Image (cartoon, helix red, strand yellow):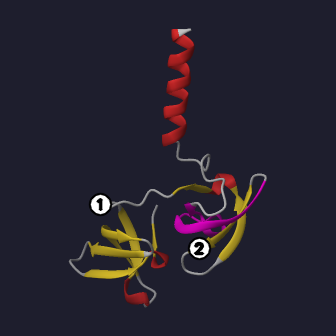
Amino acid sequence: MIFKSILLVAASAAAVVAPSGAFAQSKGDWVLGRWKGGAYWYPAVIQRVDGDQLTLQYDDGDRETTALAKVRPYDWTIGKKVECNFQGKGDWYPGTISSLGGEAIGIAYDDGDKERTKTGRCRSR
């Protein structure tokens, strides 16, 4: 009985930290999605769940339906490395999240610049 309880606790702990979309299954959940299966993760909100297919509304306004395997729990926190579209001009630069508040995000760029922008202008690897 003790062994079974230990296994259950270990399995639960592993599921919580798993980088898959295992917990990104409810409408309204904020997640990171791989737009068109690309290499980067972008913030989005789940709009619809249909089996293992999720319809995502990305913070930049784009929308797509994708597989659950192509999303992961939103894990952006202060200190996390990201790339952002500096001043919305189309060029992406590496930086660190310095503040967060909903879709507002503060970025300390690696070159010393700072910016307060929206999460829809940022991505992570």
Neighbours of disc 2 within 10 Å: few (<14), some (14-19), many (20+): many
SS for callout 1: loop
Name the outermost residue toward the bottom.
89
Residue 41 among those drawn in magenta: yes
Which residue is identified by label 2?
58
Q: Which residue is mark 1?
A: 79
User: What is the x, y in percent for residue 120?
Assistant: 49, 77
Cβ atoms under marks 1 and 2 closer than 8 Å: no
Name the quadrant containing residue 81.
bottom left
Which residue occupies 38% across, 82% down?
117
Assign the N terminus to one quadrant of the image: top right
Give the left or right position of residue 99, taking residue 36 as reference: left
Q: Residue at x 57, y 68 (%)?
A: 44
- Start-end of magenta stretch: 30-50
Number of marks in picture: 2
Return the residue nearer the eye: 122 or 24: 24
Q: CA distance from mark 1 to mark 2?
A: 22 Å
- State the image coordinates of residue 89 (x, y, percent, origin top left): 43, 91
Left or right of 92? Residue 50 is right
Answer above or below: position of 22 versus 106.
above
Q: Secondary structure at mark 2?
A: strand
Three-letter amino acid code of the residue under disc 2: Tyr
Q: Residues within 10 Å of mark 1 (few under 14, many from 20)?
A: few
* Residue 21 left/right relative to 41: right
- Residue 101 magenta: no
Q: Tell me the amino acid under the disc marked 1.
A: Gly
